[in-house]
Image (spheres, rainbow, N blue to C red):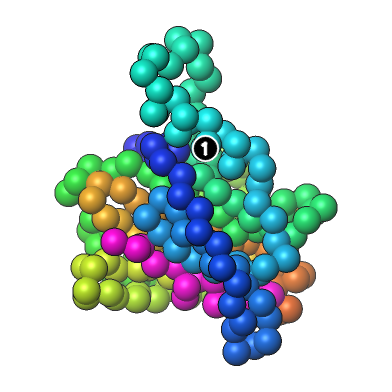
Amino acid sequence: MWVHQILDRLHLNLSTRHISSGNTFTSEKLFNSEFIYPANWVGDQTLLYRAAGKAELERGLDPPPLNRRRQNVNEPVVAFGPPSTNGELNVSVIVSKVPLDFSIESFGGPEEVGQAIVQTIVGSSRRPDVKGSLVKSTLRNDPSKMVKYYELEFRVESPSFRRHNIAVCCTQSGKLYTLNAQAPESAWPELKADFYTIAESFVLTS
């Protein structure tokens, strides 16, 4: 099982840029990754404070308190979304430790990887009424860093919600990086171009 946890340092580097669509995006650098998101979105303060607190503990000389609560294994290291909303529309990044020899390619090509990830997401909900379907899956290769980015578009729905997601997964040096952008299915036509821009911008920085 992949163990998800906050890494030991938090580095933020924000800048604003305009995309050809006319929308304004902000660039985020952290945890050896970079991506852009709409400039009017805000960060999840709970995650930011928790990550900063963990970094402070890591730098301290004293051992961590014995009663410190274990980190939620599925918790993102950072998340952004529109202000004053319920969180159903957001983009987040999860960084997980994996074995050094772990390879996404072992699941097969982009289609097989996409199907495996969608089924894992659906299975993790533990609700039989949650269904997932892969829309498409593509591979983006960066030979200079020897990193393969698997870009997946999929739907997750149940009687109570319908969501559209784009995720990007890649591995490097024993870490699995996953960017996920999600929106209500009803909002997807309006957000589609922005979500593709976010996904295509996600890269590892070293």
Choose between 155 and 18: the one closer to the eye: 18
**Residue position for label 1:** 51
Q: Position of residue 36 (x, y in %)?
A: 55, 68
- Above-or-below relation of 119 to 50: below
State the residue lying farthest toward the left. Answer: 101
Residue at (50% x, 59% y) in the render: 13
Q: Quadrant of residue 169?
A: bottom left
Choose between 144 and 163: the one closer to the eye: 144
Residues packed near mark 1 inside 10 Å, few (<14), some (14 to 19) or many (20 plus): some
State the residue lying farthest toward the top. Answer: 66
- Above-or-below relation of 63 to 137: above
Q: In the rendered structure, which segment of residues is drawn in magenta?
A: 191-206
Q: Position of residue 15 (x, y in %)?
A: 56, 68
Residue at (34% x, 51% y) in the render: 176
- Above-or-below relation of 191 to 65: below
Was residue 200 drawn as part of the magenta stretch in this picture?
yes
State the residue lying farthest toward the right. Answer: 84
- Above-or-below relation of 116 to 16: above
Tell me the amino acid under the disc marked 1. Ala
Q: Position of residue 120 (x, y in %)?
A: 45, 49
Residue at (22% x, 74% y) in the render: 144
Magenta-colored segment: predominant secondary structure: helix
| Image quarter hosting the C terminus | bottom left
Visible in this render: residue 191?
Answer: yes
